[in-house]
Amino acid sequence: MTLSLTWAQDKTPVATGKQTGDMIFLRDYGTDDTGYLVVPEKQPSAGIVMLPDRYGITPKVKEFCAELAREGYLVLCLDIYNGRTAKTEIEAEQMAAMLFEKNIRKTLRTGLKFFEASPRFQMEKKVVIAWGATDQLAVRCAANEKDLYGLVLIYPSHAPEQEQMLDLKTSLYIQIPEDSPNITSFRALEPELTNRLRKNFELKILPRDSGETIATTALHTFIQQILIQPKTDTLLEKIF
């Protein structure tokens, strides 16, 4: 594996070439999974564990990882499809049908453990980003993670499970287009989530003509906001 930089003892980043991503093995952290790791060219502010959509780790996903790294995040996109990428909608549907909560929970825990135990890439602050078809699985898994700073849902494919969503004890950012078939369900939950999580919740609704655009500026602003605050579970203990 070739990484794009090294850090000096005083934590000053030392660039060693063009910022790129690499596939790495995660067997030292509990499973035989692999992940796509992108290292920023400056000291990272947080570690991001990403679950890709049903198309797998496509060039688009890799570019999004690179964008996040340019903002100063250490990004690990988990290969939950064992190296497969879909080229058609039918292939994507078949891949999504192979997702099982038990496996995703174990793989996500491995990704978080990478940031907890890696000698070089240990990160105190961790955020999970889930794309599309992995949304509900990510919500269920995040509910059991005590050290998570935030959960981000990009283009969620399913209507929200109210009980699971309201049980979250971490900051939550949802980005969804206004023509999504699930927009009404998310809007119905917005008041309760806002009341519970306060400034640690945002429902970002994109215009109809946005295509598959990701509002990276709004996402980055939200993540930076939650990183400078105590974790949401600590805040909830004080409120409730």
Image (spheres, grey):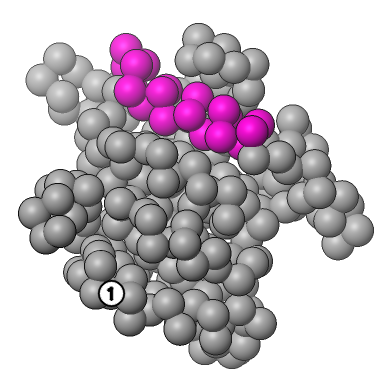
The x and y percentages for residue 181 are 66, 82
Q: Quadrant of the N terminus?
A: top right
Q: Amino acid at mark 1?
A: Thr
Q: Residues within 10 Å of mark 1 (few under 14, many from 20)?
A: some
Left or right position of 45 against 83 = left
Q: Is residue 116 magenta?
A: yes
The x and y percentages for residue 136 are 58, 55
Q: Which residue is mark 1?
A: 194
Q: Is residue 108 above or below residue 3?
A: below
Q: Residue at left 59%, top 17%?
A: 31
Q: Residue at left 30%, top 57%?
A: 171
Closer to the camera in the image, 114 or 146: 146
Closer to the camera in the image, 210 or 27: 27
Q: Secondary structure at mark 1?
A: helix
Closer to the camera in the image, 15 or 48: 48
Q: Is residue 91 magenta?
A: no
Residues shaded magenta? 102-121
